[in-house]
Amino acid sequence: MPVLISKTLHDAGKAYGAFFFLRADMKNRVQGFSRDGIQVRWGLVGAQRYLKASWPVRYGLFHEIRTPSYLFQFSAEGVIRFVQGRPGTWHEHTDWFKRTAGGDWVYYSSGGYNGAFSAIGEHYIPIFPYHSNPVIGEKAYPAETLRAVLQALETLTAWAEKVAEELPPEGAAFLSCVARKNQKDTLASQADRFHELTHGPLTVLPPDCRHVDYDILPLRLARGCLYHCRFCEVKSSQTFAVEAPDHVTEQVASFSDHFKADLIHMGGVFLGEHDALAAGEGPVVAAAEACETLFSGDGRMADRPSLFLFGSPHALLNVSEAGWEALDHLPFNVAINTGVESLDPPTLDYLGRPTPVALVKEAVKRADEVMRRCRNVSVSLNMVTGDALPPSHHESLSCFVASRDTRDAPLYLSPLKDHAHRRTTMAEFTALKRISRAPLFLYLLQRL
Ligand code: SF4
């Protein structure tokens, strides 16, 4: 017979360190048993606020199964989210895999990257199973390790199915759920369904999504973008158009149905696609209000979820005083990301970017004003970089960075594909970091 263990949350907290921010309604739920050298625990509660950490912090309600080789951690609904090798089984046992809602297994490398925080604002480097950020990180994606992990997960689901039959009801329910929801085909169809709902895979998300580890619900408010810049590889060919209001509410209902209890793991919403702010302040505020229900359940991860969106320079300048006020009063941390790309006219021409420098400067000024005036709205800026860009771009970038103040809008640098060699780009970035008083990071492109 398996040994049933019931722990208080206090005990569970000790096992995971002292970094829990607990909600009263989530106490005393941890139960578990061990059998065949495998330890099963469900109803664990992790951190309730996002932390900047170099170790694998777990958030919200989760469950876990420890085998001699792996630690498998599951969402509230019992879907696999994290896998870590046990000490002695992986070369880097402090690293971990995370499965995204879109079905990608991202490898989090937390060792050997002392400059990670300086480069991307996090204490780890995510390594993706697709070509994305050649400038950041050196490690290759550990495809062989993932193959072994997936094989171990298959073995675990078979074990769970068998053992569930011999357990008391609660343990049986948990293991049956693990067996049912984590088979290869089930996980694949779940990812496909997510992409159907989100018009994905989405190839680009605002860089500020890193603050909630990309645990976001992508909801499309508008299609296409205003500029159709020549250099851009992620643009949609569609003419800019705002979605009908019922499209937004339908997506909200679909997310509720798809994620169910796993909504508690979500840190926010991404209002897509490339320029949701250009839909206008009214539709943005209405979409945000429609999303409130997604974050109203018990035990949700985010007390104050985030609302991420891109906003072009034109869109940023079109928001009225009343619009900023309305955005600032939403129950979200609103994070707008504005691509200004360059302050150098020859470079804007080279990029095929139809935004005159005067407009770009106005947008930067507005972003800085918002950073000072709004309590719950932030604006970050993007600029391109790459040694193949005109020298005048690098000069204007350096002058711009040197002029920034600590309270100004953060700047993300986006190395241009086929234009940026790793060594020169990192050398320029390091030099810019030295002269910048405002936050400056590299833009990490992550898909979902
Ligand atoms: S950079 Fe932005 S505005 Fe320009 S084409 Fe790409 S998505 Fe559109």
Image (cartoon, rainbow, N blue to C red):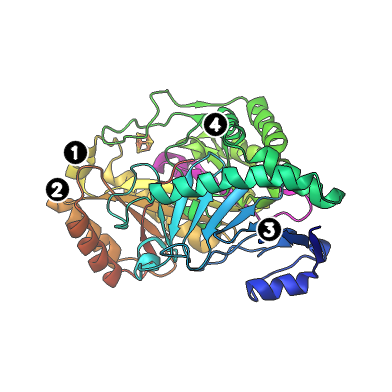
The quarter of the picture where residue 137 lies is: bottom left
On screen, 237 above or below 178? above
| Mark 3 crowdedness (10 Å alpha carbons): few <14, some 14-19, many ≥20 | few
Residue at image point 41% right, 47% down: 338
Q: Which residue is mark 4?
A: 195
Look at label 3 and name its amino acid.
Asp
Report which quarter residue 402 is drawn in.
bottom left
Q: Quadrant of the N terminus?
A: bottom right
- Cβ atoms under marks 2 and 1 closer than 8 Å: yes
Among the two numbered marks 2 and 1 on one chain, the one whose residue lies closer to the N terminus: 1
Q: Which residue is mark 3?
A: 36
**Three-letter amino acid code at disc 4?**
His
Question: In what element is the residue under mark 4?
Answer: helix
**Mark before the other along the chain sequence, 4 or 1:** 4
Task: Give the quarter the ligand 1 occupies.
Answer: top left
What kind of residue is marked 1?
Answer: Tyr
Determine the secondary structure under disc 1. helix
| Residue range corresponding to the magenta coloring | 295-324
Residue 441 visible here: yes
In the foreground, 132 or 223: 132
**Residue 60: x and y, percent?**
68, 58
Q: Mark 3 or mark 1: which is in front?
A: 3
Q: Which residue is mark 2?
A: 390
Task: Return the residue nearer the eye: 81 or 415.
Answer: 81
Marks 2/3: CA–CA distance:
64 Å
Q: Given this view, does label 3 or label 4 mark the residue nearer the observer?
A: 3
**Residue flagged by tag 2: what amino acid is it?**
Pro
Residue corresponding to mark 1? 350
How far apart, in angstroms, are the residues tagged by discs 3 and 4? 38 Å
Image point (43%, 51%), residue name: 145
Asked whether residue 292 appears in the rendered view, the answer is no
State the image coordinates of residue 238 (x, y, percent, origin top left): 42, 23
